Amino acid sequence: MKTLNLSIVVMIPHLFSSKKEKLYRAIKSVQKAKLRSSLKLKVRILIHLDGIKNAREKKSFEKLLEKKVGPGVYCTWCEKNIGFVGGINKAINFARKNLNFDWFIILNDDAVLVENFFSWMESYFYSRDIDVVSGIIKNINGTTESFGLEYYQNGIALGNTKDNNPEYFCATCFCLSGQMIEREIKRNGYVFNPLFFIYAEDLELSLRLIKDNRKIQLIPEIIAIHEGSSSVGYLSYIQVYCSFRNWIYIILLLWDRQLIMSNIKNLIVCQLKFIKFTIVRRYYFIYPHMIKDLIKNSFQLFQMRLNYRRNLKEFNKPFKLKYLSEPPFL
């Protein structure tokens, strides 16, 4: 079994207007990890560029990229910023059509793989019953950012775990099996929920997998170093808006009716706390903006929820509510 060649795509999302030095380091870390591996791997690197003006600018960037990191890096692009979620979904669709793969790895453009990455992942990459593999992620100062359960300074703190089979994974660096990608696209038309744009998209997918009795594997090894992003400021308008709105989306999509009703008082209190928080921060239009968005997407949310109820093996399966009962920042 292990003599088979593995085909792997490493996808790195990148906002074109942000600085490029961290992106180059991320790409070089993938190349170095590949060279250190004894596995028979076919590794392709795929960059998604958001906010690029036109094909000419893309071509110019590709020439610069080849000069900085060498040839063989693929690129997808979009003129407007379609977010972390849109970029990953677009890259997945490109890879499915053009790059045959067994595993699809997502790496933040402000993170680097450790040199032993592919060696740590070896036994898991050959497994047929694992949907997602991730591991320990370190901050640049050496502290542990997550063990598959915490975001990096984005307001949604889910708590660390010592369990190698967690319920959630972290979006900084993770590996998706090709069979899981095909299954989710066949069922839902997407891997990451397109309504989310940025933040909590990994949490929504994690809950889908939990309720479908799928396996998320977390290895007790450091797999990446996260330098931290400057593309979205901490507690910026877009961060606060998307984080809180997506928290509401997760409740509407994946909490069963009994769970919602038993927590209705807490949910109402959280809304009031959030309104107070936005007033203190002088983000006066966030809550009305969020309500408008909820109304606009209400039918689509309803259809998604029905689809999840129909397809997930255990839609009412409990999960670690203590990590999710309080919204971001409160």
Image: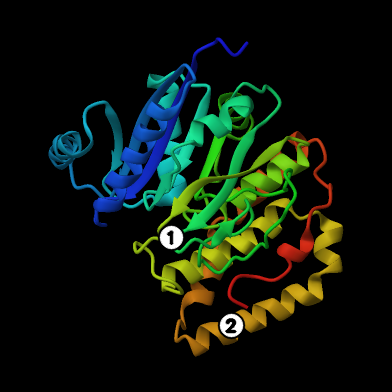
Front in this rendered view, residue 81 or 207? 207
Residue 247 image-quadrant placement: bottom right
Q: Is residue 309 visible?
A: yes
Q: Relative to 45, is 161 above or below?
A: below
Residue marked by disc 1: 140
Q: Amino acid at mark 2?
A: Ile
Q: How is the image coloured?
A: rainbow
Residue 220 image-quadrant placement: top right
- Image coords of residue 126 (percent x, y): 62, 21
Residue marked by disc 2: 275
Q: Amino acid at mark 1?
A: Ile
How far separated are the C-alphas under marks 1 and 2? 34 Å
Front in this rendered view, residue 11 or 93? 11
Front in this rendered view, residue 123 or 259? 123
Callout 1: SS: loop
Badge 1: few (under 14), some or many (20 or more) residues near its Cα, within 10 Å?
some
* Residue at position x 41%, y 21% in the image: 97
Q: Nearer the viewer, mark 1 or mark 2?
A: 1
